[in-house]
Image (cartoon, rainbow, N blue to C red):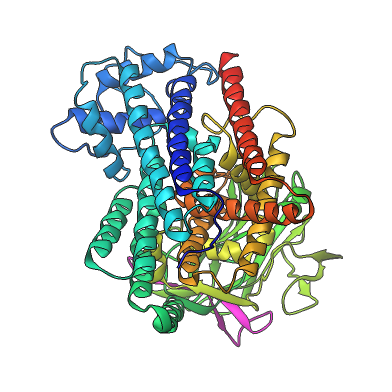
Amino acid sequence: MPLIKRINFKVDKEHWAFCLVLLSSLILGLLYIFLVPPWQHYDEPGHFEFTWLVANREKFPELGEEDQQMRRELAASMMEHGFYKSMGFHPNLLLQEREIWIGISQINDRPIYYILLSAILRFIPTSDITFQLYVGRLVSLVFFFICILSARGIVVELTSPGHPLRWMLPASLVLLPGLTDIMTAINDDVGATVFYSLFLWAGVRLISRGFNWARLLALLITAGLCFYTKNTVTISILLIIVPVIFSIFRGQRQRAARVVLAVGAVALAFSSLAWGDAALWYRFTHSDMPTRQRDQQAPLGSQVFKFSLIPQTPPLKLIQIIPATIEGNLRGKPVTLGAWIWASRPSKVQTPILVDQNQSIFREVEVGTLPAFFSFSTKISPGSSKLNILLSPVKGAVKEAFTVYYDGIVLVEGKRPRDKHPDFDDSDGERGRWGKSSFVNVVRNGSAENAWPWIRNWADRFIGRFFPGRPSIILSILLDPAAAKSYYQSTLIRVAQSFWARFGWGHVPLLGIYSYPVLGLLTLAGLVGAIIAIVRHRKQLQWDLIFFFGVSLLFIWGSTIMRGSGSIVEGPYLIPVARYAYPAIIPTMLLLNLGWLELFYRINRIIKIPSAVGSAIFLILFLGLDVLSLLSIVKFYGN
């Protein structure tokens, strides 16, 4: 059953329109290939090096392998095209022993994209290094054609002949400057985008047309290509089950498919999640040990932090992020950090550790089996931009097993007496008096009274294979928006801008101060319109396909936004860009186009606008964006 039935023009015109789209992709692709200077895409020198080594070595290159002569030629080309101009240095091309710097090595990346690209470079091994780069970019353009064909194939499965989405979706992919820029670079994001697009196409065909072995084989092959291309699309391995189940349980039996998926999801959640960790404290290391327990010796409340130390096992570490709004008020000021500490036997342990970008401050103290209060005073660096509290009882693995307990962890502004402990007003340790003055505790949940969920060790490691980032850290950050607020703000702005048009290494913006706000409004309009369309057509929609697309969108966009989440803990912020989300570009642009089309139909009820005029407005807006993008590239690199 088609997703939406609406015929707007004849099928032969539809085919001619798609041919025009392919021609446009060729023209625009060539413009981006030759207008963007050599090596001015994300990590392009490193990606080219990996491709070149695969093409010119008998054995597959290993981590740390290099070719000094090739690096010398590559660095010379980078210098010739102004790559190092803004970096304040030039590499020494005469080095014989140490490697010549060309950027971050990509040799540890997954191999499929590089193997396919190297097959072409094998025919031109002695050509100029810059010429080889352009040949590689042209091969990426061929991959882009395949991505566009995948979009066409998917939308044909979803709609009736003549539906405007059949030309709008592939056209919007071709005319999306950020996508065309990436898809004409040497970068494994190209492979991830095209193979995941093929995977989606295979999944849609399996769901729409029903199970057969040829369709299943196509799904398995494309999932395997994704797995061996990049970790951003490893989710394809887990998603295989969705189209398979929906292709087997069809029609009236589809409810059974939903039950199977729901039961599987609930079972996975119950087996991988547990309850009872100290809320607002992140697991910095892998461990299956609980971080809090009820203890009659607790000086404050009824719960304490528990660290079970086992020989030859890395000790558990917990970290709390001080929100930026609070940290900013402490810069350049004296503070005092303290806690009640004891152990299962007399031991030498570390107090809570105050960590900023410049230093880690703590005391090493002798503790007994009864709670004792320890504190120290210090001064926060004026230039600090990140402040954390780390709980790590010992520096390394212990020789004998024992347990360390913390309670009533407190960080306050000002220098407080070390010979006195604070008197708290509540069991959560939020306020009280220390010495002669009152205080507000900067540490949140300093007595472990509040709990939250945590990911078990096996699940943390397993899911981490399919997800770029530590799942346990990501879960904690999602549950602690106060600590991640500035990261979310920076990331959403960066991702939104780079989704539409941001070039080079993310440092070449669009011209015009209103460009990104206008694009933001268009994005918002598309999302709102899509929600209206889904609600209006809810009875005609294929919800199995929507579920398949929805999981893809949620995972890939979610992993993109959370890609730099580890930097919230370890800093400084690593702000991701939208290229990591481009594997889901087909369902993303399908959603936006559906929304714009819905808004056009609603406006058309009030103001009669011929469909040809609506199509022209759509194309003019996108073409205007491409012209602005190309002018932005020429102006930036021309200067």
453 left or right, relative to 379: left
Residue 181 x/y as whole percent: 49, 32
Q: At 36% across and 31% down in the image, what residue appears?
A: 46
Residue 463 x/y as whole percent: 40, 64
Image quadrant where residue 194 sits: top left
Nearer to us in this view, 430 or 434: 430
As displayed, is residue 39 above or below residue 118? Answer: above
217 left or right, relative to 330: left
Nearer to us in this view, 368 or 285: 285
As displayed, is residue 19 above or below residue 427? Answer: above
50 left or right, relative to 495: left
Which residues are drawn in magenta? 291-312
Q: Quadrant of the image for the C terminus?
A: top right
The answer to whether any part of residue 302 appears in the image is yes
Q: Is residue 588 magenta?
A: no
Q: At 38% across and 15% down in the image, what residue appears?
A: 77
Q: Is residue 304 magenta?
A: yes
Q: At 59% across and 75% down in the image, what residue appears?
A: 452
